[in-house]
Amino acid sequence: MTKQLSFFFASLAVIFLSACGQGDVLRVDEAVVNLSPVDGNPSSGYMTIHGGPDDVSLVSVIADDVMRMEMHETVETDGMARMQQLSVVSVPAGEKIKFEPGGKHLMIWGVGRGSIQRGLLRMIFIFSNDDRIQVDAVIREAGGASPETEENTE
Ligand SMILES: [Cu+2]
């Protein structure tokens, strides 16, 4: 290959790389599960979803080791906070969607003993573009240690 040609291909590679942009990868991190202090009551889950290159929706979150998991949002009506179930959560391209106390959250019933012992709950986030992202959420015992985050283990 001549010098000019290899320079040409090297430039092409740079152009493709920069076209991808930075941080525009659909991903989930900072996932935690706060166990309910009361046996039998649902636990709550929080995480951050980072939008990818396209607008998508989160259509479901599943886990093998729970009895039931729902997406909820706390809304205030007439000064009263109450929860409503969400069937989808839109994740616009490049935007950050936070599930956090007082807002969107996961409601989780029956977290299995094995996961509690490991301190991690494996979840799968299913998106409208068929992306499935597996995340190990850090389980925090009620009134337990300080928050920790776990990177997405896609
Ligand atoms: Cu809820």
Image (cartoon, rainbow, N blue to C red):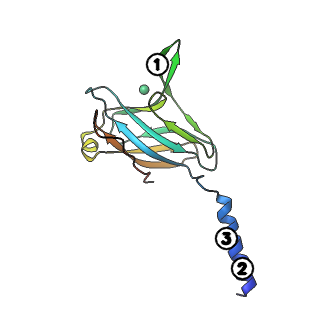
Quadrant for the C terminus in the image:
bottom left
Left or right for 115, reference 124: left
Q: Residue furthest right?
A: 4
Label 2 secondary element: helix
Numbered tag placed on residue 7 in the rendering: 2
Q: Residue furthest front?
A: 146
Residue shown at 45%/40% (left/top)?
Answer: 47
Left or right for 119, reference 136: left
Residue shown at 33%/34% (left/top)?
Answer: 67
Label 3 secondary element: helix
Q: Residue furthest top?
A: 78
Residue shown at 42%/54% (left/top)?
Answer: 153
Q: Establish if 11 lies above or below 86.
A: below
Quadrant for the N terminus in the image:
bottom right
For marks 2 and 3, give the CA distance.
Answer: 10 Å
Residue 79 drawn at (x, y percent): 50, 13
Numbered tag placed on residue 13 in the rendering: 3
Residue 45 drawn at (x, y percent): 40, 36
Left or right for 12, reference 118: right
Ligand 1 lies in quarter: top left
Instruction: For ligand 1, tell me if the residue under mark 3 lies within 8 Å.
Output: no
For marks 1 and 3, give the CA distance.
Answer: 52 Å
> Residue 121 occupies which quadrant of the picture?
top left
| Nearer to us in this view, 62 or 146 | 146
Numbered tag placed on residue 82 in the rendering: 1
Q: Residues within 10 Å of mark 3 (few under 14, many from 20)?
A: few
- Tell me the amino acid under the disc marked 2: Phe
